[in-house]
Image: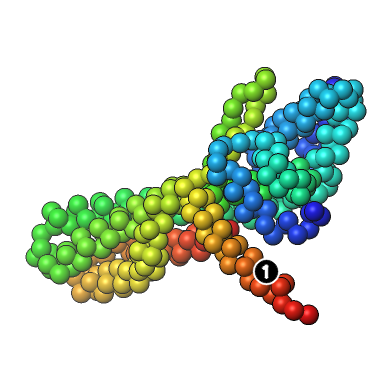
Amino acid sequence: MKPEPLKGHLDFLLLAVLEAKAAHGYAIIEELRRHSRGAFDLAEGTIYPALHRLEEAGLLASRWQEHAGRRRRLYRLSRRGRRVLARQRQAWRRFSQAVDLVARMPS
Amino acid sequence: MIPDGPIATFLAQLCAALRLGRRRADRILAEVEDHLLETAESLQARGLSPEEAERQALARFGALEHLAHGFNTELGTTTEVARMLRILTSFMAIFTSLIAFLIGIHSLFLDVREGGAAWVAQKIVGSTAVVLVGAFTLRHLWSRSSRSDRLIGVLWAGAIGLIPLGIVTVIGTIHLARVTGDWEMYMIAAGAALVCQGILTIWSLWDRTARET
């Protein structure tokens, strides 16, 4: 899938990936790719500005972790982030149902 | 990482392109380095040479210009301003809460005949309200828990209420001073601080709400 349609939904997808467990950027990208069965294959660096912005907004929390002699930043969903994710899921369900209804209209 | 190799060069160029504070930039560089090296290691495990693995890791990561632009726009001046706003609002909340607490304590021991029972009662009630709003403000600005959001309506009302409270405090103090001749300058300063705190708290609440996705 081309990266353009993803732009408006990247925050939602990042929150959803981090709902299950904390992860660093590389693992988040791999999870996105795996769960979308390869449909979401965006430039890997694009998630970092979004992760930082979500953390600034209080939706994520992060901490350093030592790994193979390097520092690794681990992100997790905050309580506020879980609440926002639930709200965005509901909005997405309504939106996708409406799109389905219109898309199935006879031509 | 290959010294002066593709990843090292990329990181040096990214460092030069970022227009952020030192701590933020260092953190971003550490994260990007970790990501690129992990990608390169996984590619090397599949049989690529170290240099080719680094090049492919960079190709998958994306263009430097887009990444730097993304960081500079997402985390540049706007975010720094938001952080300063949060710090300034917190400072004002602590300052006015402390002043209010001291005024409240002082009023408890104040001779009622000096200022009248109504004036003393107003000071105590006002001081208590200011301390509570200050506490709620600090909790909301710095807590990542959603529990603090349950009181957000109360916080908005409290923040809005600080402005007329501050104005009434200043006007009331000036009026009383004209009658008694006793200028309580600390009350005028406290009133002005309340107005400032109200404005800053409203601004912070609005900014935080606007930033939430």
Q: Quadrant of residue A48?
A: top right
- The image shows residue B65, relative to residue B26, as above or below, that is below
Residue B15 coordinates in the image, percent (x, y)? 77, 37
Residue B196 coordinates in the image, percent (x, y)? 43, 62
* Kind of residue sitting beneath label 1: Asp
Residue at image location 20% in from the left, 66% down from the top? B122
Q: Quadrant of residue A25?
A: top right
B177 or B71: nearer the viewer? B71
Residue B128 coordinates in the image, percent (x, y)? 25, 58
Q: With B116 as the anchor, is B176 left or right in this view?
A: right
- The colour mode here is rainbow
Mark 1: secondary structure: helix
Any part of residue B50 in sight:
no
- The image shows residue B144, relative to residue B49, as above or below, that is below
Any part of residue A99 in sight:
yes
- Please give the count of numbered marks on the rendered protein: 1
Q: Which residue does the numbered mark 1 point to in the structure image?
A: A100
